[in-house]
């Protein structure tokens, strides 16, 4: 009788919760497997959120890099025009002003931010990375100094996988920076172009064009690097979704109740319980009769 009551209770509980295993005592092996799958799914969800964040940072970086490429390209074109020996001093000064505007725009991109985080500040994302030094005589920018860090921000996107989500604006060792490296300085290249134009120097007599073309190729290389990182994050997101689906299916097979099957089990349990109840009632009546006799 008690066994039939327990069976009826268990089936009703499964139907109300939609789960086969509500307690460890229901099925110890399945319960342990279910808890493991739930833990894995929770971890996968966190990795997916981290990947979404990484993809957002890389997308913002793409936009800033595209602007940088455009500005350096414009400066390179200006250097080509500066090689025209027929330019008069007035034309060269007008071009010097254009170069100065490109310099200011390049500095604005280098100090660009999104959501209070500076794109090229390394790990010091809350602080403006670039500080300009101004010539007191001309009032023009004479140099740009980096105040950010040179580290790369890494976000965990898998059990043993991390995504690099930024490129430091400047690096004192190697060629990893965007605007300044151990061998180049994009700001200085534009400053040199501007100052030679203001001084009336023929561009053909300088290395401005060569420097700017090298700078452009460098930035394009960083664009490719960021694109590769972006693609890797997208591929990782696809993998995480596949793993989530696999684990969800495994969890469903272990824990989700088939309502049609459960309804049949409930009917059988109710029938068995009613039969047991009837049998117990009949037995009690017989015992009562014997006691009376």
Image: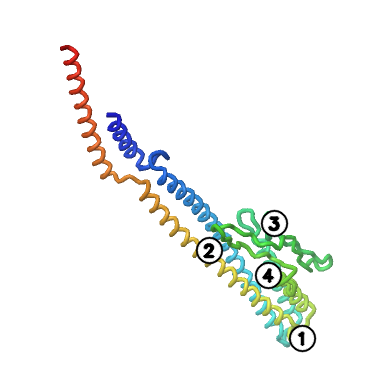
The residue at the point 19 percent across, 23 percent down is 283
Q: Nearer the viewer, mark 3 or mark 1?
A: 3
Q: Which residue is mark 1?
A: 205
The residue shown at (51%, 52%) is 43
The answer for how far apart the CA atoms under marks 2 and 3 are is 23 Å
Question: Residue 228 lies in what quarter of the image?
Answer: bottom right
Q: Secondary structure at mark 2?
A: helix
Residue at mark 1 to residue at mark 2: CA–CA distance = 46 Å
Callout 3–callout 4 Cβ contact below 8 Å = no
Task: Choose the circle earlier in sequence order: 2 or 4.
Answer: 4
Q: Earlier in the sequence, mark 2 or mark 3?
A: 3
Quarter holding the C terminus is: top left
Residue mark closest to the camera, 4 vs 1: 4
The residue to which callout 4 is attached is: 176
- Horizontally, residue 84 falls left or right of residue 232, namely right
**Could you tell me residue 22's position as x and y percent?**
39, 39
State the image coordinates of residue 32 (x, y, percent, origin top left): 44, 46
Element class at badge 4: loop
């Amino acid at each position: 009788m008690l066994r039939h009551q327990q069976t009826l209770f268990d089936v009703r509980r499964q139907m109300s919760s939609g789960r086969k295993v509500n307690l460890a005592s229901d099925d110890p092996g399945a319960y342990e497997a279910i808890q493991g799958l739930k833990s894995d799914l929770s971890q996968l969800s966190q990795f997916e959120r981290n990947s979404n964040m990484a993809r957002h940072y890389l997308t913002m970086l793409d936009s800033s890099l595209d602007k940088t490429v455009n500005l350096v390209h414009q400066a390179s074109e200006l250097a080509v025009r500066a090689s025209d020996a027929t330019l008069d001093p007035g034309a060269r000064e007008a071009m010097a002003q254009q170069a100065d505007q490109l310099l200011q725009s390049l500095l604005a991109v280098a100090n660009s931010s999104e959501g209070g985080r500076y794109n090229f500040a390394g790990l010091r994302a809350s602080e403006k990375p670039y500080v300009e030094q101004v010539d007191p005589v001309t009032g023009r920018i004479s140099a740009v100094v980096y105040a950010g860090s040179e580290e790369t921000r890494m976000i965990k996107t898998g059990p043993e996988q991390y995504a690099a989500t930024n490129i430091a604006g400047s690096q004192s060792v190697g060629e990893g920076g965007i605007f300044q490296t151990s061998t180049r300085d994009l700001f200085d290249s534009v400053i040199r172009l501007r100052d030679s134009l203001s001084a009336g120097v023929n561009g053909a007599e300088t290395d401005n064009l060569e420097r700017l073309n090298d700078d452009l190729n460098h930035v394009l290389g960083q664009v490719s690097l960021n694109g590769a990182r972006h693609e890797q994050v997208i591929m990782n997101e696809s993998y995480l979704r596949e793993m989530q689906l696999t684990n969800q299916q495994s969890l469903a097979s272990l824990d989700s109740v088939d309502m049609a099957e459960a309804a049949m089990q409930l009917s059988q349990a109710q029938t068995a319980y009613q039969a047991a109840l009837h049998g117990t009632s009949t037995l009690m009546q017989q015992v009562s009769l014997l006691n009376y006799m």
